[in-house]
Amino acid sequence: MRSAPPHQHLITAAYLAAAAFGTFWGTWGSAVPSVRDQAGLGDAQLGSALLFISAGALPAMLLTGRALDRWGLRSTAFLVAALGGAGLAAAIAADGLVSLCAGLTCVGIASGAADVGMNSVAGRAEKRTGRPIITRTGAVFSTAVVVSSLGAGGAFALGAATWVPFAAVLLLSALAGTGIYRALPPDRSGPAPVAPGGQAGIRMPVVPLLLVGVLGALAFASENAHQSWGAVFLEDVLATGPGISAIAPAVFAAVVAATRFAISTLEPAHARLVLVLGAIVAAAGATVVARAPTVPVAVAGLVLAAAGTAALFPTLLSIVSRNVVESSRGRATSIVTVVSYLGFLLGPVYVGVWASATGLRGAMLAVAALGLALAALTLPLLALSRYTATPQPAHVSHHP
């Protein structure tokens, strides 16, 4: 007999999925140089190979939403475990460009599916409880990224083979998947509810989801621009060594985690304010980085940028979660995630284009422009979507 408070198992499942997802990507971030060397690739070949992660992730995200709506959120348990397996397989098989591309395609498929599953579980938990579970899940993810990247880096420093940290990730993913499966009851929601007009099922409006996805794309473009180019900026513009430049992504991820934990105490009614102020702070941080004369000033700018971008996507996903019917949760999550993910992919490219034209300082100012664009578009696009940030009462859910 379960003694936990109502919905506590649902919350636990969301946190387990986020921890496993973050552990994988933190390990991967530290393993990229080792994977490159094992596969015998140059930087240009590695860059091409990394595109296959996205090639696998995007279609998987679209398909996973419908699968979750059909077979239930319990499927997330298998998706999380599959990500750990895909990572280990890719690490072992990385022996040349072709094998690495094949492995990274599998990683992308598993990652995209697990991402949608994780966010769908968190979305249901948030709607059922009225608590900011999505933002807290994002904080758990970022914390796991920091911890696992340091752990994997330590393992590689001690001479561990490329596959060793991924074996640990697979074990943790399997344990997390088991916990998720046990925490989530089988979905017994049946067919989609009857619409007010009397027609069976509810047609999910796509345009509002696309509008929110555009905002998410701007948020992710700014965030990943700093994550991907922060260390390069310190090395190329401020002439630091690799050891010092590595603090850029570490500081950014740590501040994102801390900010998400802190911002989760705010009421959902403040969601629009969080989005606008976060975008402005992110723009200010990018501007400080662009003008920074020294490393401490640049790091301070990264702290501002991280604090500003941290709550943007979780808040947008939270708004969607509170306005979507349960029978369409997976599809709604996948649409918003896919559109937002395009910004994540294009953000570093956007910086590269501007850097080639204006230098990295000018590129950081272009990143600041993304934040200002997000601040200007947030209220109009949310108004057009007709999504409200006000939480629905917990009793409106009729699912067991």
Image (spheres, rainbow, N blue to C red):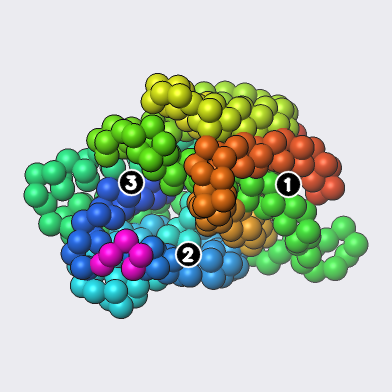
User: Closer to the N terminus: mark 2 or mark 1?
Assistant: 2
Q: Is residue 8 visible?
A: no
Image quarter where the N terminus lies is: top left
69 left or right, relative to 9:
right
64 shown above or below 363: below
285 shown above or below 345: above
User: Which residue is label 3 attached to?
Assistant: 26
Question: How crowded is the residue under tag 2: few (<14 C-alpha within 10 Å), some, or many (20+)?
Answer: many
Q: Is residue 382 magenta?
A: no
- Residue stretch in magenta: 41-45
Cα gap from disc 2 to disc 1, whole angstroms: 28 Å
**Would you identify the image quadrant in which residue 338 lies?**
bottom right
Residue 327 versus residue 164: which sits nearer the camera? 164
x then y, percent, for residue 152: 22, 45
Residue at the image point whose x is 63% and y is 58% from the top: 339
395 shown above or below 210: above
x then y, percent, for residue 332: 66, 57
x then y, percent, for residue 138: 49, 39
User: Which residue is label 2 attached to?
Assistant: 54
Question: Disc 2 or disc 1, which is closer to the eye?
Answer: 2
Residue lying at the far bottom in this picture: please name it: 98
Q: Is residue 43 magenta?
A: yes
Residue 323: give its label: 1
